[in-house]
């Protein structure tokens, strides 16, 4: 049997240089979110298949890595479909597992509960630059808080950590699913077709207004509704004033409180921010997950062509586990894309400790080796990173490799 040295398609090996950046980013995330009152939890990588297939994960439910039943439960001869062979799968995000976690442990958790969760997730997606089948997610969520203070806290925490890492001049695009529905109702689209309308609207950044209008008509919607819909977007500015415009236009279709809350989120985040970013109202923002019930948001950066993070309110998901609604809202940083941007920009982890190497000649005595190790131990105790190695025949090449790894001091140890 021939062994394959390359990783499985969509997975990747992580080299030391990237691992250093990943660890640094995770450290900044953990420290910053802790300062905002979030506490870290962990959920299993494997979830019940009925939870994963609960029609809350949108397109991700088509991308589940399913796990076959084991032992006596696996009855191949009796299986009539794939569902008869599986009882669990790898999680495709951290939100569904968090909802199950909260439903199972609510009595032992404070209310509201501010959760920090970091871990790998899996989707059988088509791999591309910045997108893998296994990738790290970093989420913060607030459960048990119905007011929009939760959205403000999430936006400020997320933007603060991005600012600490070094990102500037990025945008938090924000919308509300209830505004989306009110706009569709105002324009005469049937409620049963909202999802189809939103799928087409979500293509706005790729095909433009004319393309969206054309697809709506081709999908069987009236030209009048399509024209009215496009006119709404043309009249709406990308700021709090744009929300006010829609609040007036959609009178009778939209509860004004939803618009007022969104205005408050935008203004509060702008006033309290520490990082270099701006808030933008985007009435075309859809977010694919069907579990979103209120405000939704995404992070846009000029350096990257698509979103590098997003989230929103999902007040109904926990209730599907316990039979009563629990307000919940979360924000996820696009960890892999952020790391990729840092790698591509030649980012150097700040404040790295001194890295020193000793190259011991093969002719050195045991006493010299012992003395070098003792010296290295003392320097490690003082906070330095010290690597003790036997010198190779091509010492120059070895030193070049160490320099590339960030070693700034390299000392040769020769035989006395």
Image: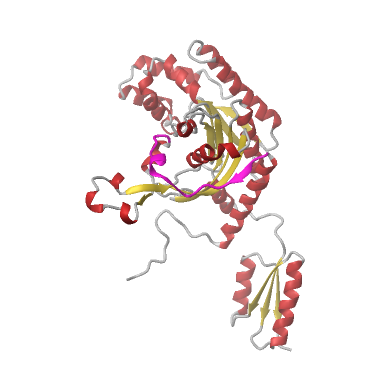
Please tell me which residue lies in front, 88 or 367: 88
Residue 382 picture location, percent across and down:
77, 66
Residue 269 picture location, percent across and down:
66, 30
Residue ranking furthest to the top: 252
Query: Is residue 409 placed above or below 125 in the rendered structure?
Result: below
Residue 388 picture location, percent across and down:
66, 75
**Which quarter of the rendered picture does the C terminus lie within?**
bottom right
Residue 249 picture location, percent across and down:
51, 12
Question: What residue range appears in magenta?
Answer: 37-56
Q: Which residue is drawn at 59% across and 75% down?
A: 397
Q: Residue at x 64, y 47 (%)?
A: 30
Q: Which residue is drawn at 39% across and 25% down?
A: 197
Q: Is residue 48 magenta?
A: yes
Q: In this view, does 390 lie to the left or right of 43?
A: right
Q: Is residue 209 left or right of residue 138?
A: left
Q: In this view, does 25 lie to the left or right of 50?
A: right
Q: Residue at x 41, y 50 (%)?
A: 127
Please tell me which residue lies in front, 247 or 303: 247
Residue 19 visible in image: yes
Residue 124 visible in image: no
Q: In which quarter of the image is residue 320?
A: top left
């Amino acid at each position: 049997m021939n062994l394959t040295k390359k990783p499985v398609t969509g997975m990747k090996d992580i080299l030391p240089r990237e691992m250093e950046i990943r660890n640094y980013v995770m450290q900044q995330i953990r420290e910053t979110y802790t300062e905002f009152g979030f506490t870290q939890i962990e959920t299993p990588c494997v979830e019940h298949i009925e939870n994963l297939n609960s029609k809350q994960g949108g397109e991700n439910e088509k991308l589940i890595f399913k796990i076959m039943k084991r032992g006596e439960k696996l009855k191949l001869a009796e299986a009539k479909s794939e569902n008869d062979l599986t009882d669990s799968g790898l999680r495709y995000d951290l939100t569904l597992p968090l909802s199950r976690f909260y439903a199972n442990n609510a009595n032992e958790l404070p209310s509201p509960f501010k959760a920090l969760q970091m871990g790998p997730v899996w989707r059988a997606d088509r791999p591309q630059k910045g997108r893998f089948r296994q990738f790290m997610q970093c989420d913060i969520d607030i459960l048990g808080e119905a007011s929009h203070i939760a959205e403000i806290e999430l936006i400020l925490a997320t933007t603060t950590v991005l600012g600490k890492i070094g990102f500037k001049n990025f945008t938090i695009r924000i919308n509300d699913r209830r505004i989306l529905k009110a706009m569709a109702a105002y324009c005469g689209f049937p409620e049963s077709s909202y999802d189809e309308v939103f799928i087409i609207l979500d293509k706005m950044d790729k095909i433009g207004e004319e393309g969206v209008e054309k697809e709506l008509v081709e999908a069987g919607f009236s030209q009048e509704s399509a024209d009215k819909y496009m006119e709404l977007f043309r009249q709406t500015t990308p700021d709090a004033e744009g929300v006010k415009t829609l609040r007036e236009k959609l009178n009778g279709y939209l509860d004004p409180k939803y618009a007022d809350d969104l205005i408050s989120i935008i203004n509060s985040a702008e006033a309290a921010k520490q990082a270099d970013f701006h808030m933008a109202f985007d009435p075309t923002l859809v977010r694919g997950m069907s579990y979103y019930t209120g405000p939704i948001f995404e992070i846009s950066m000029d350096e990257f062509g698509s979103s590098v993070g997003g989230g929103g309110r999902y007040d109904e998901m926990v209730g599907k586990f316990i039979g009563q609604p629990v307000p919940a809202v979360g924000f996820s940083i696009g960890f892999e894309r952020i790391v990729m941007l840092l790698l591509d920009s030649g980012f150097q982890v700040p404040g790295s400790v001194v890295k020193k190497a000793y190259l011991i000649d093969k002719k050195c005595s045991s006493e010299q080796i012992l003395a070098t190790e003792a010296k290295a131990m003392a320097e490690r105790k003082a906070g330095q990173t010290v690597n003790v190695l036997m010198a190779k025949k091509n010492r120059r090449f070895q030193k070049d490799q160490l320099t590339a790894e960030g070693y700034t001091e390299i000392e040769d140890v020769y035989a006395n």
